[in-house]
Image: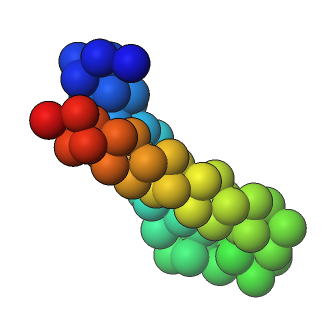
């Protein structure tokens, strides 16, 4: 995979991370984290997966350079 492709994926994952963090904040602000714990935990899984994938692509891109 070329550096530009890694960077595009990293940028898209950053958007997903930001959107998910925003949604988590809304959940917490409205108490939905307690009312809907399964959905809240699923958001945490999505966030963790996106961060992990972003880190993997960053490391792969740096290894090419």
Q: Residue 13: x percent and y percent?
A: 42, 38
> Which one is nearer the viewer's eye here, 9 or 37?
9
Looking at the figure, which quarter contains the C terminus? top left
Could one spot residue 43 in this view of the protein?
yes
Is 37 drawn above or below residue 22 in the view shown? below
Q: Position of residue 20 (x, y in %)?
A: 50, 52
| Position of residue 50 measured from the top left corner of the image (x, y, whole percent) | 52, 49
Residue drawn 23% across the image and 23% down it? 3
Return the x and y of residue 32 as percentages of the image width and height: 70, 72
Q: In percent of the image, x 46 and y 56: which residue is there?
A: 51
Q: Quadrant of residue 57?
A: top left
Q: Could you tell whether 39 is left or right of 51 in the image?
A: right
Judge whether 35 appears above or below 5 on screen: below
42 and 49: which is toward the camera: 49
Can residue 47 be seen here? The reply is: no
User: Which quadrant holds residue 28?
Assistant: bottom right
Question: In the shown orientation, is residue 35 left or right of residue 17?
Answer: right
Q: Determine whether, in the image, residue 40 is placed left or right of residue 13.
A: right
Where's the N terminus, which quadrant? top left
**Image quadrant in which you'd find residue 58:** top left
């Amino acid at each position: 995979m070329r550096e530009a492709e890694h960077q595009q994926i990293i940028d898209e994952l950053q958007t997903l991370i930001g959107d998910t963090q925003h949604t988590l904040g809304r959940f917490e602000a409205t108490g939905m984290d307690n009312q809907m714990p399964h959905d809240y935990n699923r958001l945490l899984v999505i966030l963790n997966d996106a961060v992990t994938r972003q880190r993997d692509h960053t490391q792969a891109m740096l290894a090419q350079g």
